[in-house]
Image (cartoon, rainbow, N blue to C red):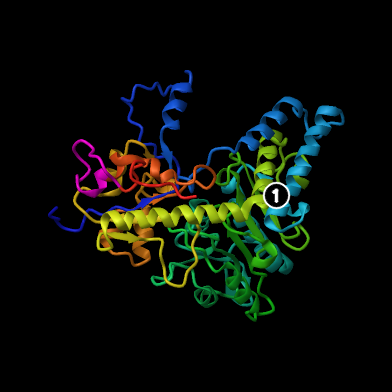
Amino acid sequence: MSETAPTTATPVMLDHEPHTNIPHHAGVDLDPHTNLEPLADLIRDRVYMDYNATTPLEPEVISAVTDALRFAWGNPSSTYLPGLKAKDIINQSRDSIARMVGGKAEDIIITSGGTEANNMVVHSAVEHFWKSCVAEKGARERGHLLNGSRVLPHIITSNVEHDSVKIPVENLLKTGRADVTFLPVSMVTGRVEAEDVVSAMRPTTCLVSVMLANNETGVIMPVREICERVRAVKRPAFSPRVLLHTDAAQAFGKIHVDAQDLGVDYITIVGHKFYAPRIGALFVNGPGTSTPIHPLLYGGGQERSFRPGTENTPMIAGLGKAAELVTTNLAAYESHLLDIRLYLEQRLLAVFGEEKVRFNSHFPGSDTLPNTCNVSILGQGLQGYRVLSTCRRLLASVGAACHSDRGDHVEVLLDMCVGQAFARAPELWGPIPRGSKCPEDKCGQTDISARRGRGGGGPPGRGGAFGADELEPRS
């Protein structure tokens, strides 16, 4: 096939919020008030590869949720049986979450999700800055003179963070309530480098927030090294403590996460990324004692008043069960994920050839998540969105779910020195971690034929990289 200008590559990512390529004319009524069984039957025939966006619930998690709905419906603050049962479930779940993250039960604060947890960290860091550096001098006005200089709290983060970190600190910057440094990732490694973090530090730095693993490339950030280097910096006597945070949303269930090993003060936990419901938690290393935490909400005394509000027992039960499964089965999950990803990458190379395929998740010297494959394919009509629109059985995404309406995934790749042609053709895929041994085999001939030379148009042909009739599932 003759190729026109290399402007047609669009990365495909295996892992993000369901950009379902189910056409509205598929004969399925998508009205949420109607019976959803036909939709479930349709999806059952698809291959879901968007696991960095969200995951379905494990059967054991569903059982934990439904049991809590049936038998633990009482208010956890009550003293009668259903309430006591609810409180017991919450305590057990907190223990399971703590074991998964390598902390203590008292270090876990249940939140509505990752967005709330991240906002709580940013809020706490700024509040702690003013209380530790300004209040002691008898003034708390923004812009107070500290040691003779006009100052604001300073936050260091990266330019590839989730919006629930990026937008809160941007808002602080725009409203004149904080200074913010957005560090670029290395063009060579795809990581935020510890040396750059240290170089960006100021006497007024109060927070360093760097994600543990990038949701688009899968690159694992050197959070442990960053924490060690930051803590080793000699600070002026009047400087506030630098609080250290990592958003580990993409890491749980894929790689080992240990709070003590990382050396962080805060870790964000997001349930729906590891087969739990849409609920979250925040690890705080000694909340209110060793590490400051300031509530965003005020009300009752739930969650030790750090996060008041009557607890959502069923969702907490599901989060606890999912955490228990991760702790028990992580080695098997990680091995299986890596096995599938490598197999998928081999098949893509075999079909398209090395000259047309770029794996945007491959960086020399950098570790990556075992499940994430960000790939660009050069060729006429092979932009990621066109490829996915022709794939009748594959559910994947062009970039991160939270950026799906803005195209920010292109900027992430350009920041990492991925060429224009490849950066504008990403597909992000996330192979199934717990299921069939080779789910990509089921993508079928129709999916790859569109990629291999039909330019995304015309009837699908037979024979493709993932055709179940061509590939032997691996044991």
**What residue occupies the far right of the structure in this picture?**
79
- 329 horizontally vs 200: left or right: right
Three-letter amino acid code at disc 1? Ile
Q: Is residue 458 magenta?
A: yes
At 68% from the left and 76% from the top, the residue drawn is 238
Q: Position of residue 282 (x, y in %)?
A: 66, 52
At 64% from the left and 77% from the top, the residue drawn is 147
Question: Does 58 appear above or below 236?
Answer: above
Badge 1 is on which residue?
Answer: 97
Name the foreground residue: 157 vs 127: 157
Question: Does 189 appear above or below 173?
Answer: below
Q: Position of residue 166 (x, y in %)?
A: 49, 56
- Give the prevailing secondary structure in the magenta stretch: loop
For label 1, count other residues whose C-alpha is less than 10 Å away and answer few (under 14), some (14-19) or many (20+): many
Q: Position of residue 336 (x, y in %)?
A: 53, 52
Tell me the SS state at disc 1. helix
- 277 horizontally vs 383: left or right: right
At 51% from the left and 53% from the top, the residue drawn is 337
The magenta region covers 449-464
Name the foreground residue: 61 vs 112: 61
Q: Position of residue 299 (x, y in %)?
A: 73, 40
Q: Is residue 300 magenta?
A: no
Name the foreground residue: 237 vs 52: 52
- 305 horizontally vs 363: left or right: right
- 158 horizontally vs 416: left or right: right
- Give the number of marks: 1
Question: Does 213 appear above or below 297?
Answer: below
Can see residue 216?
no
Examine the image and state in which quarter residue 460 appears: top left
Can see residue 359?
yes
At 78% from the left and 28% from the top, the residue drawn is 74
Name the foreground residue: 25 vs 124: 25
